[in-house]
Amino acid sequence: MTNDQANLHPAVTDCLIIGGGPAGLTAALYLARFRRSCMVVDAGSSRASWIPRSRNYPGFPPGITGNDLLVRLREQAGGYGARIEHGRVDHIEPHLEGFSVRYGEQTCVTRRIILATGIEDTLPDMPDVETAIAEGKVRLCAICDGYEVDGDNVAVYGEAENAINHAVFLRTFTDQVTVVVHGEQDACDQAIALAEHYAIRVISDRVESMQPCETGIDLLTCRGERHHFDIIYPNLGARFRSELAIQLGLDCDACGGVKVDEHLQTSLHGLYAIGDVTMGLKQISVAIGQAAQAATAVHNSLEANPWGGSVPVAR
């Protein structure tokens, strides 16, 4: 067969996984161990790559960096035969065999799809924000690492309604919590009342700028007030990477979170969604659990594949 013929009649994959974060790679690991042909198309933008060291992931008492976890998952899934390619899927359409998927200049046909594209955090506009995140001065998930705050001088800033809830949660771990709030006056008033109840300091102003320094972050408000904090949690929201789901007309919530059933299947038969792109708690452990469920559901949705002889795979 010529290359042109191969492009016209590409091999059919049992399942294509879009997104190579912990959820997508775990799904690939399960499917490969089920001896299903599967491929991960990864754009290289997993939220996990921002994690300097997670002590919230089970089984790693000293912690593990997000990138080290991704390396291990890629190695493990690849060892069982999962194919992992770098690329960004930009189009999906129905096909007689299931779906036709385009990524870059490549096209593949797949019987099932697992969408694991995640979310994208809105980062603060500040110099060297990546370094500040790596050093733990700017943090993105209080549930993930609030335990490590342990008495530090912490600030949360953003729209009043969400920022105050994060500040109350962080009061579990320190008595030095400041919330910098803006937004609707009623929401700000409610935030101030709640802050007083929990002994949280309130700065009712927008942030003009933030500057990393040796001991933390210097924050300047629009009124010209300067404050110093050991750690800052920006609460600026996140964007669901659900463009493909919306393109296909899948059921999503108002923010773009993909709706799924008890088997993690979307409103389109044969297409599943897992991890942060779905609604619910944004945690690696949750995403990995969903990956196991979805991969098993995909396997069960296909015809049986009885053993036909030894296949060399990692143990």
Image (cartoon, rainbow, N blue to C red):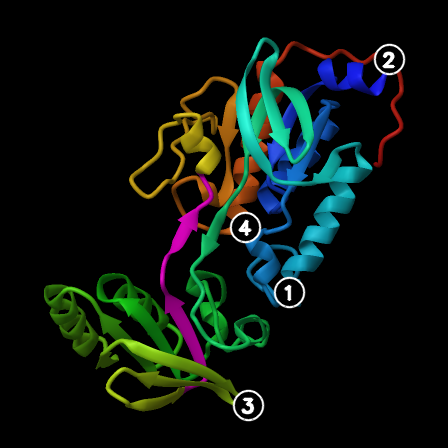
Q: What distance separates the C-alpha of mark 2 from that of mark 1? A: 49 Å
Residue type at mark 3 is Glu
Classify mark 4: helix, strand or loop: helix
Q: How many marks?
A: 4
Looking at the image, is mark 2 or mark 1 nearer the viewer? Answer: 2
Q: What distance separates the C-alpha of mark 2 from that of mark 4? A: 43 Å
In this rendering, would 260 be left or right of 136?
left
Instruction: Give the class, few, some or many, for how many residues have Cα within 10 Å of label 2's Cα (few <14, many ≥20).
Output: few
Quadrant of res 100: top right
- First in sequence: mark 2 vs mark 1: 2
- First in sequence: mark 1 vs mark 4: 1
- First in sequence: mark 2 vs mark 4: 2
Q: Main secondary structure of the magenta part?
A: strand
Residue type at mark 4 is Ile
> Quarter holding the N terminus?
top right
Q: What distance separates the C-alpha of mark 1 from that of mark 4? A: 13 Å
Q: Which residue is mark 3?
A: 214
Q: Which residue is mark 2?
A: 1
In this rendering, would 7 be left or right of 127?
right
Instruction: Give the class, few, some or many, for how many residues have Cα within 10 Å of label 4's Cα (few <14, many ≥20).
Output: many
Q: What distance separates the C-alpha of mark 1 from that of mark 3? A: 24 Å
Q: What distance separates the C-alpha of mark 2 from that of mark 3? A: 62 Å
Give the vertical position of 89 relative to 7 (above or below).
Answer: below
Q: Which residue is mark 1?
A: 63
- First in sequence: mark 3 vs mark 4: 3
In this view, the residue in front, 211 or 5, is 5
The residue that appears at 27% across and 76% down in the rendered structure is 206
**Range covered by the magenta-colored residues:** 229-242
Q: Which mark is residue 284?
A: 4
Q: Specify whether residue 22 is in view.
A: yes
